[in-house]
Amino acid sequence: MGFDSKVVSGVIMRVDHKLYLAFLIFITILAAFFRIYNIGLNSLWLDEATSILISRGSISSIIQADVVHPPLYYLMLHLFIFLGDSEWIVRVPSAIFGIAAIPLIFKLGDKLYGRKQGLIAAFLLAISYVHIYYSKDARMYTMLFFFTLLSIYLFWVALEKNDRRSWMLLTVINILGLYTHYMMIPIHLVEFLFVLFTHFHLNLEQRGCTIKRDTLKPYILSLILTALAIAPIAIMALSGLSGKMSGRNIIGIRPNYAFFHDVVIWFDPTSELGRSTEPIFSLFYIILFR
């Protein structure tokens, strides 16, 4: 009696799937331990105290409180504050988004490259010192990172399926991301350039790509809906910043040469990289600010 190759292949695939799932669960538990362990050990620092102060207000005051950062994180923290404002309580939302990013980055890696690469990405993120640090910080950065990963994943799904549901889901996540932090804008720019490039320049079918060609119109519609949804906070932010930019003063910081120079090479001004970027930076400053 011979073996049915399809049956054997199906069994191997099921075992393989369960093995990857077991590894992913282990990595996620490991990530959760790193992000929860001693989460309330360190005292609150200035920005965390600012988060609490803003989140204690009414919903209307939260929306108007910070012109630099959108209000979604503060609104979410507003709900957690009802449980208390101790160090570990106000940091729990960041830890939750930090942990949730682990299976999400696996899904993204699996979608783009394969399960093995997705598992490697999940493990590297799980042990990332920077990500662990911000997962214990009562600020919006792990929330931003989560929405960034989800946006890229859904963006790829929408390009492949090109159906209304996928584009609407992507639009909702992009809106939530922009209501979390304006640094979602560069992500949208990259996605937009990618759509233009694939629409006008690539012969996708010959390259074996699963992305559909007619994605430009639904993506533009998604961008328009996103722009309309964030228009209220964008107008509020611009009007708030305009009052702080008189005399070339941005958010209380004068953009002089020393400030931008320190921003560019703050990590080690005596390093080779610091010295090599100084002439480039000087030219950049002269063009923009002189």
Image: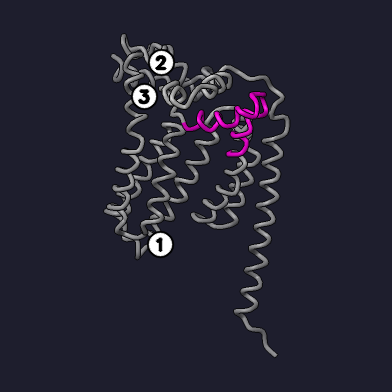
Helix, strand, or loop for circle 2? Answer: loop
Position of residue 111 measured from the top left corner of the image (x, y, whole percent): 50, 56
Please tell me the numbered disc located at residue 251. 2
CA gap, disc 1 and disc 3: 39 Å
**Is the residue marked by circle 3 packed among few (<14), some (14-19), or many (20+) residues within 10 Å?**
some
Which residue is at the front of the view, 207 or 221?
Answer: 221
Instruction: Give the residue at x 51% y 28%.
Output: 74
Look at mark 1 in the image and give the residue it sits on: 210
**Residue type at tag 3:** Ala
**In the rendered view, does 100 fall on the left or right side of 228?**
right
Helix, strand, or loop for circle 3? Answer: helix
- The image shows residue 155, relative to residue 3, as above or below, that is above
Position of residue 282 measured from the top left corner of the image (x, y, whole percent): 37, 18
**Residue type at tag 2:** Ile
Look at mark 3 in the image and give the residue it sits on: 237
Would you say residue 56 is visible in this rendering?
yes
